[in-house]
Amino acid sequence: MHYRLLSALVASAAVTAVEAVEAAAAAAATYDYIVVGSGPGGGPLAANLARAGYSTLLIEAGGDEGDNPTYRDIQNFNEAANDEASRWDFWVKHSDDPERELKFGHTTYDTGDGTFYIGTKPPAGAKHLGIQYPRAAVLGGCAMHNGAVCSLPQDDDWNLIVKATGDTSWEASKMREYLKRIEKNDYLPAGNAAHGYTGWLATSVGDASFAKNVSLPGTKILRKLAELTGQDPDAVGTLVNSDILGDYKNRDEISSFYNMVSHADSQGKRSSPNNYIRATLADPAKYPLTVKLHTLVTKVLFTNSTGGMANAPPRAIGVEVMEGASVYKADPKHIAGTKGPVSQILAKREVIISGGAFNSPQILKLSGIGPREELEKFKIPVVKDLPGVGERLADNYEGSILALGAVPVDSGLITLIFRTPSAPTKNRNIFTWCGAFSFEGFWPGFPAYYGPNQWTCAMVHIGPKSQRGTVKLTSADPQDVPDINFNFFKDNGATDLHELVEAANLLRESWKSAGAPATPFQELHPCPGELGKSANCTDAAQAEFFKLQAYSHHASSTCAIGGDDDKLAVLDSKFRVRGVSGLRVVDASAFPVVPGAFPVLPTMMLSAKATEDIIADAKKSS
Ligand SMILES: Cc1cc2nc3c(=O)[nH]c(=O)nc-3n(C[C@H](O)[C@H](O)[C@H](O)COP(=O)(O)OP(=O)(O)OC[C@H]3O[C@@H](n4cnc5c(N)ncnc54)[C@H](O)[C@@H]3O)c2cc1C
Ligand SMILES: *[C@@H]1O[C@H](CO)[C@@H](O)[C@H](O)[C@H]1NC(C)=O
Ligand SMILES: *[C@@H]1O[C@H](CO)[C@@H](O)[C@H](O)[C@H]1NC(C)=O
Ligand SMILES: *[C@@H]1O[C@H](CO)[C@@H](O)[C@H](O)[C@H]1NC(C)=O
């Protein structure tokens, strides 16, 4: 499979973009707060701090694509994630076994002639890049190119922060208040106590009326799935409208269909931090928010003394930046050797890092905060030896079963969260969505189209037992991309793989009920051949398939919150970087574990909580 690299074509466009950098933030200007990164963690936080009256500078490496239909219209999410206007390609590893890496079906090579080769039989001389892990460098972060799927973490995911740190403000019941604060519900009648209606984040659902038509193959599959997951097959027509963000007793233990919720309005327009930031800038109240686009933060600046006190911890006083579009080498538009002007910007109160799970640990390390040995290797002066920075990288494992119906499989989208028999707790462990699409992970040009008969159940595994991934520097150069190894399945991998296999077996079983003319299905993977007839479709063979072909896009936990006794804790329960002052990390890297099945909504909730914590501290100190 070949896909064109567009870099050469867009090089001239990139130059125009540099000239369009907002002139607002003059070098050495001083703000109360500097927030680095405008994604779900940093974007809403910066807007909120400005709305609370604090002068705030939001620095974003990318530009603003808010009016671009590729980003604005939610149906274009696959194009958005492939779009060179915002794309940062991280070429990651899933393990430290080079042979295993080469077996990933969509591993990617640079052919040297301006194209990628994707697959396991590269042409001679092609340079192996790795597994593409897309990120959006754009105002609004990955919430601008993502699938916009919203779900809540498991209550345990919040409550374990209480257990680790003793901070009861993280209790799951309290975290719902942040959902209510940010949400502008566009799918339920006003007054539902579980929801908010006046926030900035629009939430909406799709049309699930197909499930009322019992003669559709999709509905027949639904009915079988109901039977297999302890739900009433005769009630699927209403069960598919269950509220995935609802407040149910023991919700995490209930296998249930849902109507998928998106962070978009009911007209299909994406709702993200981009909208909120722009609304904040445009507000007649003239909130003191400055947004500096196309600017890469290269490090945090520190001073040794706090108000003249001896032995005070180093204090963050600002950031160093490099201006220019595409100065980071993950940007496919980057032109080798290009640099931008470097300057310093100061913060009176705090610096908040929200660069996402790959860039926040990189920024901390470049600033001298991280494992001493790694920093010394690159001659970075150690400000604070913090061994957990860039560790604990984890992600939801994802896999799919993909087949071709005998004819197109008429169905709407099926969304189901369920528990497989070997799940370690009473909690559900698989989030699946099934329909007439294909989704097999990420590579340049994804997804593949298998024709109108394609049928998939995409699975997101909840609660990975391994958190051994790492983000490590490759140099002290902030334009360089770090080395990212997820170390998939390193701890208790067989257990997680077994859960995925159990899920695949259950989902496959339901497909048999689709009925003629949709059946028989021809399965493409994990068990190639006529569905249910493959002699090779053993649990072991499927586990091996998922081990080699699992993918992911919900990275978290590289600057994790943890207790005082936790050597790998990077943050305390108020997002403060341990061992220094005036510095916090607020984004998906702060989660101690992967939050549920989809991180974007949890990250926005966490950001709303951080707003409150930061403003509370500001009030104490002034
Ligand atoms: C293709 C794709 C689809 C996804 N689909 C879903 C989904 O459907 N549902 C879901 O819940 N999650 C989804 N996710 C994941 C979700 O979008 C992310 O978990 C979430 O956006 C993380 O937010 P964040 O604030 O931690 O980081 P990010 O969203 O990555 O934002 C970080 C921001 O910081 C900027 N930045 C980084 N470094 C610097 C620097 N040095 N200087 C200046 N700026 C910098 C970046 O440009 C970026 O804008 C998806 C992710 C991808 C990649
Ligand atoms: C149900 O689906 C069948 C098959 O597509 C179609 O012929 C029929 O009109 C549908 N019924 C309703 C009530 O929409
Ligand atoms: C902080 O103190 C250390 C050790 O005394 C010194 O090497 C470093 O340069 C100082 N840093 C700043 C920013 O003053
Ligand atoms: C089983 O796998 C073997 C080896 O990959 C292959 O040759 C054979 O055709 C497969 N059989 C079926 C029924 O899929």
Image (cartoon, helix red, strand yellow):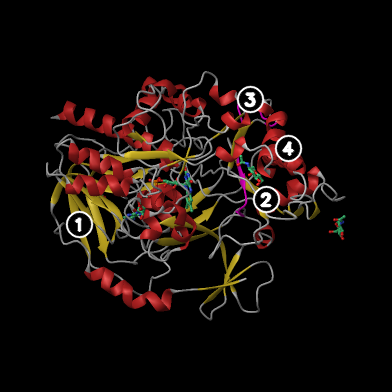
When asked about the image quadrant of residue 10, the answer is bottom left
The residue located at (31%, 30%) in the rendering is: 181
Residues in magenta?
A: 420-439
Residue that badge 3 annotates: 425
> How far separated are the C-alphas under marks 1 and 3?
50 Å
From the image, tell me which residue sits under label 4: 506
Q: CA gap, disc 3 to disc 2?
A: 35 Å
Amino acid under label 2? Val
Q: What element carries label 1?
A: strand
Q: Residue 433 magenta-drawn?
A: yes
Residue that sits furthest to the bottom in the current view:
113
Residue 512 colored in magenta in the image: no
Q: Residue 409 carries which label?
A: 2
Q: Residue furthest top?
A: 249
Q: Do the residues labelled 2 and 4 touch (CB within 8 Å)?
A: no
Viewer-closest of 213 and 52? 213
Residue mark closest to the camera, 2 vs 1 = 2
Relative horizontal placement of residue 539, taking residue 306 as reference (left or right):
right
Residue 155 in picture, x, y percent from top left: 49, 25
For discs 2 and 4, the disc positioned in front in the rendered view: 2
For disc 1, does the CB lie below 8 Å from ligand 3? no
Residues under labels 4 and 1: Cα distance?
56 Å
